[in-house]
Image (spheres, rainbow, N blue to C red):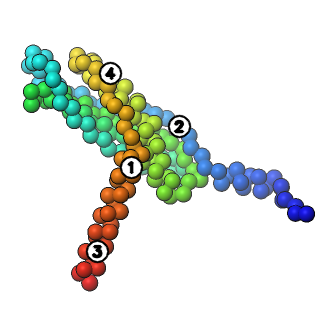
Amino acid sequence: MSEENNTPENGQAEQAAQPTFNIQRIYLKDASFETPGAPQVFTQQWQPKVDLQLNTRTRALNDELYEVVLTVTVTVKCEDENAFLVEIQQAGLFGISGLEEAQLQHTLGAYCPTILFPYARETIDSLVNKGSFPALMLAPVNFDALFAQQVQQHAEAAAQAEAQSAETH
């Protein structure tokens, strides 16, 4: 018959090794709204061309606290003139521990931006409405797919650099 060692110390060690994730704060770090084509843009037929740019950056504040900043830039043109430009930096503080490096990178690069995006989307919509333009409801973004694409691009670039290095030696 086997015995299990269920001492309090073992239970605490197991609990400490468990991954943890918590949202400590979500906040608007920066916002900009410009209407360079005003007031002429309001006299034109509204057939907008929307350009959406996304970017994320991460900063470790300590071993278990990370700031993730999602930058969303929307440029809208009407008849080849800039109708408006809006840029939001939506940020969050996330407590994360107990993850392996690959899991941590995925959490910071995909999961956290997925949490931040609805807040940025709402802020952008509000600013656009205050500029007296029609509502701009951005479609959801698949940050998992974007992160996977970025990882693939980095892997291909590393393989290319390695191949070029091998050719020169």
Q: Is residue 126 above or below residue 6?
A: above
> Which image quadrant for residue 75?
top left
Residue at the spot of label 2: 24
Q: Earlier in the sequence, mark 2 or mark 3?
A: 2
Choose mark 3 or mark 4, whichever is in front.
3
Q: Are marks 2 and 3 in contact (CB under 8 Å)?
A: no
Q: Secondary structure at mark 3?
A: helix
Q: Are marks 1 and 3 in contact (CB under 8 Å)?
A: no
Q: What residue is shown at x 77% (from left), y 56% (from top)?
A: 10
> Which image quadrant for residue 7?
bottom right
Amino acid carrying label 1: it is Phe
Q: Earlier in the sequence, mark 4 or mark 2?
A: 2
Residue with the most extreme bottom position: 169
Q: CA distance from mark 2 to mark 3?
A: 44 Å
Q: CA distance from mark 4 to mark 2?
A: 24 Å
Residue at the spot of label 1: 147
Mark 4 crowdedness (10 Å alpha carbons): few <14, some 14-19, many ≥20: some
Amino acid carrying label 3: it is Ala
